[in-house]
Amino acid sequence: MLKMAEEVQEERDLVVLDDKRKTRMLKNIVDTGGRITKAAEFTGVSKGMHYYWLKHDPEYAAAYEIAKEQAADVLEAEVVRRAVEGVEEPVYYQGKVVGHVRRYSDNLLMFMLKGMRPFKFRDNYNPAMAINAGNISVNLQIPRPEEKVIDAEFKEKKVGGGSE
């Protein structure tokens, strides 16, 4: 079963710091989906204070990295909810609500698929990857899954000695 935004928010473990404002700021960062300005507003501090804490408090900086991941989890769960469960919208007739219709987001679903299966759904899939580290340069060519199957079948025929 897919987890929805509310379930993800309920099960996360928040980092608790000595300064309650910092802890509250981190919680608000998660709750607002990573929006620093809104989180600072809800916390009652300036967003500059958040950046000051990041620069001068290593414990806060580490906790912020965790909060960013938790915020991403919340956003991802909301994307899945909108794409899979849909959102109910009112239907109006002559200015009055006469019913509701459930709308799904095909765009959000496609973005999820592109992220999860880039070799199949991404528009600009590039299996080549270059790694540069000082004087060493490595180029990797990662075959598409269907290329692996074709290559394996070719090698099997070649090793088996069968000629066509």
Image (spheres, rainbow, N blue to C red):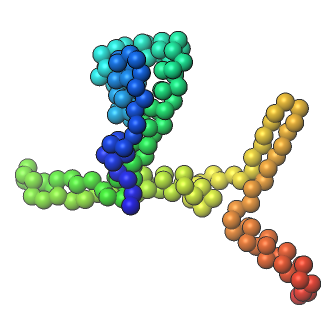
Task: Please state which of residues 34 and 59 is positioned toward the viewer in this rendering.
Answer: 59
Q: In x, y percent, where is residue 59? A: 51, 20
User: What is the quadrant of the N terminus in the image?
Assistant: bottom left
Name the side, left or right, on which 132 lies relative to 98: right
Name the side, left or right, on which 115 lies relative to 124: left
Name the side, left or right, on which 21 lies relative to 123: left
Q: In x, y percent, where is residue 29? A: 39, 29
Q: In x, y percent, where is residue 122? A: 58, 55
Instruction: Please tell me which residue is depicted at 68% across the width and 65% down the height of the picture.
Output: 145
Residue 80 in view = yes
Instruction: Please tell me which residue is depicted at 69% across the width and 68% down the height of the picture.
Output: 146
Residue 47 in view = no
User: What is the quadrant of the C terminus in the image?
Assistant: bottom right
In the rendered image of this protein, does residue 98 appear above or below residue 15? below
Task: Please state which of residues 113 and 26 is positioned toward the viewer in this rendering.
Answer: 26
Task: Please state which of residues 19 and 33 is positioned toward the viewer in this rendering.
Answer: 19
Q: Hey, which quadrant is residue 114 in on the image?
A: bottom right
Instruction: Please tell me which residue is depicted at 31% across the width and 20% down the height of the picture.
Output: 43
In the rendered image of this protein, does residue 117 appear above or below residue 152? above
Instruction: Please tell me which residue is depicted at 34% across the width and 34% down the height of the picture.
Output: 31
